[in-house]
Image (tube, helix red, strand yellow):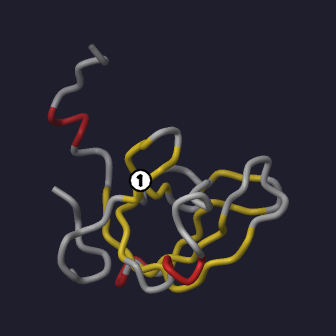
Amino acid sequence: MEKIITFEEFTKVDLRVGTIIEVNDFPEARNPSYQMVIDFGSLGTRKSSAQITTLYAKEDLLHRQVVAVVNFPKKQIGKFMSECLVVGAVKDQDVCLLSPEILVKNGSPVV
């Protein structure tokens, strides 16, 4: 069993819905990855990278809504500064992105 956390600890994680508005190859990454710009509405845009090239083509990601953690500190990945963490589920060592079933407002919290 994983470490048990309290509900209060969970509420510290700020999960939000955003729309991918730009996707680029990330050839400098150690593993095949994309660089993305995600629109979080009133929170603005944030950059992220993800190793999702096996399951997703760039054109399939554009305008797709995703869920991301927006209150982690920025992380330098090579020359790229990641500003949020897009979340997904692991399927056979690949990451499948999590997203709302219906269109919601960018910046909507995940509860």
Residue furthest to the top: 1
Of residues 13 and 34, the one nearer the viewer is 34
Return the x and y of residue 78 as percentages of the image width and height: 81, 54
In terms of image quadrants, where is residue 24?
A: bottom right
Return the x and y of residue 46 as percentages of the image width and height: 53, 72
Residue at 31% from the left image edge and 75% from the top image edge: 107
Q: How many marks?
A: 1
Of residues 99 and 107, the one nearer the viewer is 99
Return the x and y of residue 62 as percentages of the image width and height: 50, 83
Q: Which corner quadrant holds the C terminus?
A: bottom left
**Position of 31 compared to 92: left or right?**
right
Residue at 22% from the left image edge and 82% from the top image edge: 103
- State the residue position of label 1: 87
Q: What kind of element bears circle 1?
A: loop
The amino acid marked with disc number 1 is: Val
Mark 1 crowdedness (10 Å alpha carbons): few <14, some 14-19, many ≥20: some
Residue at 30% from the left image edge and 17% from the top image edge: 3
Work out whether 63 lies above or below 74: below
**Position of 55 compared to 70: left or right?**
right
Q: Which corner quadrant holds the N terminus?
A: top left
Residue at 60% from the left image edge and 77% from the top image edge: 58
Return the x and y of residue 88 as percentages of the image width and height: 40, 51
